[in-house]
Amino acid sequence: MTRLRWTAALTALLVLVPAVVLLRWPRPRAQGLERLLGQAALMQSFPASPQRPVPALWSQRLGPALARNVWQQQRRVWWQFWGRDGDGGAYLAFPAHTLPPALTAGATSGLPPHSLRVDDLVVVAADPLSQQLLQDQLRLAQRQRRGLEQRCLLRLQQEQAVFWAPLGLGVMAGPMAPLLQRFQEGCLSLRLEGASLGLTGEASAASGLLSAPGRPQPAPPLPPLPADLLLEWRGPVLDALVQGLLSRQLIREPLAARYGIGDGQLTLLRRVPFVLRVRPLAQGPFQAGLEVQLHVSGECRPWTQLLDGLVAPLEAQGLAATRTGSAALPAISWRREDGLVVGGWRWVLAASGEPQLLLYLGPEPPLANSAATLANPTLAAPTPSLGLPGSAGATVLRARPQALARLGLLPPELPELVQQAAQLDLVAMHAASGAGVLGSPLSQLTGQLQLQLRSQRPPVAR
């Protein structure tokens, strides 16, 4: 009996220990998606919904009959992505086990046309060249995904999400890409809630960042976007907006040579909080006016000196200055030869009574306060305070994409879903450090996209 009890105990031990180990340390996921992420400029994941019509991409890549067959077998997540070569169309990726047995039982030649097997996935390209490019790139040694990329990979494996690399952001944002330097690589989880698409994720100022995110912070509450604005972008320092532009020697050299804006002046510009606004114009030659309001704290003299240095170069370009305000804090509007105002600057009061500098392109903004009002502290600023609700380290973007698109003010490569949205609200929380308010290159992103839904299909980027 004793020997029998020992035998039973040993058998139980041999069965239970591996089971416990597998539960605590589950078998790693297949590496197919991780390998593809390294080749993707932009990748999206979508929850399987076989009860819905077959997506157009499936029919284009697999043909109508096979697409219907495989689509009905989807149960979890599928993907589409664009390669980093920047030329081919979208790739379709889905679990290989959902292919009909007649195909999966064969060799690679038994796969659908223009496709290849990547571990547990089947990837279908738009044409033979795109298939060969991806196949060649996958043969190269690849590093393991860590940090931001690993967290994005988990989002793409488990839910509806989008990942972008610097090349993908550059293609979508076009000429706006230098303004998005802090969001070069990142991902967002997407959740559809009625007519709104919730956005949650993170982004980095550098590709392949290994740092872990800081402690999550709640997003500040956003007030409604005023009806007379197309876009408002608030940030804790102007450097978050211009660092991509000022990193280019082609821009820095003319600023220094033509306008006298050297390193000292750039340092002054980089560190101030800002609000950038775009306003629609109902009449005149301009479709919209651009304003940048700077929270100038402390001594105003360095700013007046910077502005004084711009006068002669602008006059040399044929513009005429109209001066108002005081000698210490002048306001200037610039006119063309035909008398049309094309830009200028003026001073306004913050709610705290501190001066703020407003620069504008287009006609003069319809503001009641100017430099002359600084002598009267009872007059409030005509524009909201630059203070950001909730956190001094937040960048807040609010925009009306559909209205901007109608005026041709959005990059045409942005997803159609974004271009047709009534409003976009996005908050980027930046972790502060000893290096300053933007000490960490990581930003936590939250927001929503108010959609113009035409159907109940899951949102898919163009």
Image (cartoon, rainbow, N blue to C red):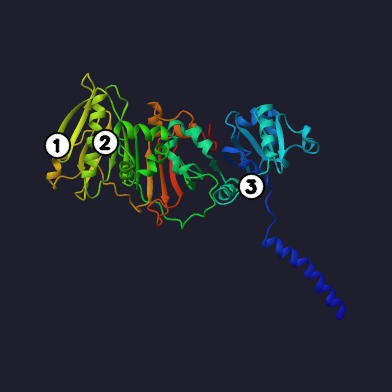
Residue 143 bears which disc, if any? Answer: 3
Q: Position of residue 203 (x, y in %)?
A: 48, 46
Q: Is residue 338 visible?
A: yes
Q: Tell me: 404 left or right of 377.
A: right
Q: Is residue 454 visible?
A: no
Identify the amino acid type marked 3: Arg
Q: Earlier in the sequence, mark 1 or mark 2?
A: 1
- Judging by the rendered image, the residue that carries numbered circle 1 is 325
Q: Residue at x 70, y 39 (%)?
A: 139
Q: Earlier in the sequence, mark 3 or mark 2?
A: 3
Q: Residue at x 70, y 34 (%)?
A: 69
Q: Tell me: 68 left or right of 301.
A: right
Give the SS element for disc 1. Answer: strand
Separation of residues labelled 3 and 2 (CA atoms)? 47 Å
Determine whether 419 is above or below 233 in the image. above
Q: Position of residue 157 (x, y in %)?
A: 61, 47
Residue 359 bears which disc, if any? Answer: 2
Question: Dot 3: few (<14), some (14–19), or many (≥20) neighbours within 10 Å?
Answer: few
